[in-house]
Amino acid sequence: MRQGSIKLGRILGVPVAMDPGVVLIGGLLSWLLATVILPNGAPGLVGTAYWSVAVVGALLFLGSLLAHEMAHSIIARRNDVEVEGVTLWLFGGFAQFASEPQTPGAEFRISAAGPATSLAVAALFVGAALGLDAAGVPTLYTTLLAWLGLINGFLGLFNLLPGAPLDGGRVLASALWKLRGDRVAGRIGAARVGRAVGMGIAGLGVAEMVFIGRLGGLWTIFIGWFIHNAARAEQAHFVSERALGDLRVRDAMSPGNEHVRTWTTIADLVDGPLRSARHAAVPVLDWNGAPAGLVTLEDVSRVPAEQWAATEVVRVLHRDEEVPTVTLDAKLVDVLEQLGRGPNGTAIVLDDEGRAVGVIGPDDLRRAIELGRLRDRMPRSTPPPPPAGVPTQQWQPPAAR
């Protein structure tokens, strides 16, 4: 779930939330329907009629977005992928998964489920509009249904564009995974195509403004820019994942005994562990030696210096529920998202007995990623041939008798 989102409940066991920006989108859609689309399709009605139908239309549109994301989630669960939840936000919605598909076929089915649902919903709305129009239902309602069918059809087709982060990019990634036998290579390839798709959409926006003179091209440019940046970030993520390979947390962490207790004063923290620690964060242990949280330089800076000697770190630390913990043998690629949730991107490293043995943070990850990239660039050397004149042995099968 996105931070700050509003929880709406559960649908088929899947947690559903809404970003506050969805209220703005709903309002804009209602305004567009009530002032432009419905009056053009059914002129001559009073404003309250347009606005009442427009609000219903906006809610139906948001419901169709939710159906799109729920389709991803349902198919994901059927393919043994753990679903954390669905969130509606400013640019539509997304389903968040806690695990990855295990086969290219599973990724294809999960990715294609959303656009297929949008196209099915579009056909349903268009069919309803045609049927109700033939039955003599007022044009105001059939106009709304026709618009819902059109917008869902557009979204379904748009999402099939072959580039990450769109659903079509996931479909492309599954195909590349199948061809190359490498999931990460498939994701990197789809992200590269996504960057090109984003630039192409932005180019169409520029052409719309230059040759047609429509300011709506600015919105097209913004969409292209968003897709390009999202694809670039996804490419960087999976390039980093490839560089990390099979490295474990123990291979990248910053070991050491720099820690403090909950009753340690900030003055002792600054003069001791925080001064010598490699990170701007230090683990805090309780009286039993168990992790109680993490204290950072930023936490310390919020306390006036004259109060350091009388202020214990327990009053400023990030509690253990806010700080991710990882184990020594966890793969780095599996804990990237956890690290991003911690203060300063830092997590506490635990041994097999649950004792804090160090921390791992952004600097450790950057170093591991850079070393991995350098390792990938190293030429794969082969043993040189023996010098001329030096006898060599070669096994030969015994001659048949």
Image (cartoon, grey):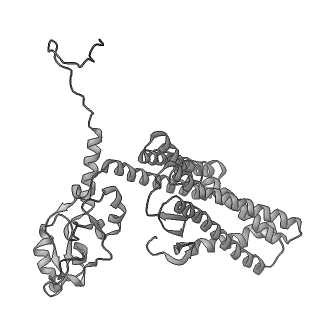
Q: Is residue 291 above or below residue 133?
A: below
- Seen from the viewer's position, the closer of residues 396 and 19 is 396
- Residue at point 79%, 71% (across, down): 141
- Residue at point 19%, 61% (across, down): 254
Question: Looking at the picture, how far across and down is residue 71, in whole percent?
Answer: 59, 62
Does any portion of residue 91 appear in the rendered image?
no
Tell me the quarter of the picture where residue 261 sits: bottom left
* Viewport quadrant of the C terminus: top left
Question: Looking at the picture, how far across and down is residue 285, in whole percent?
Answer: 19, 77
- Seen from the viewer's position, the closer of residues 305 and 78 is 78
Question: Looking at the picture, how far across and down is residue 211, in whole percent?
Answer: 64, 47
Tell me the quarter of the picture where residue 273 sits: bottom left
Outermost residue, front side: 401
Left/right placement of residue 176 relative to residue 384 reads: right
Does any portion of residue 256 appear in the rendered image?
yes
Tell me the quarter of the picture where residue 44 sits: bottom right
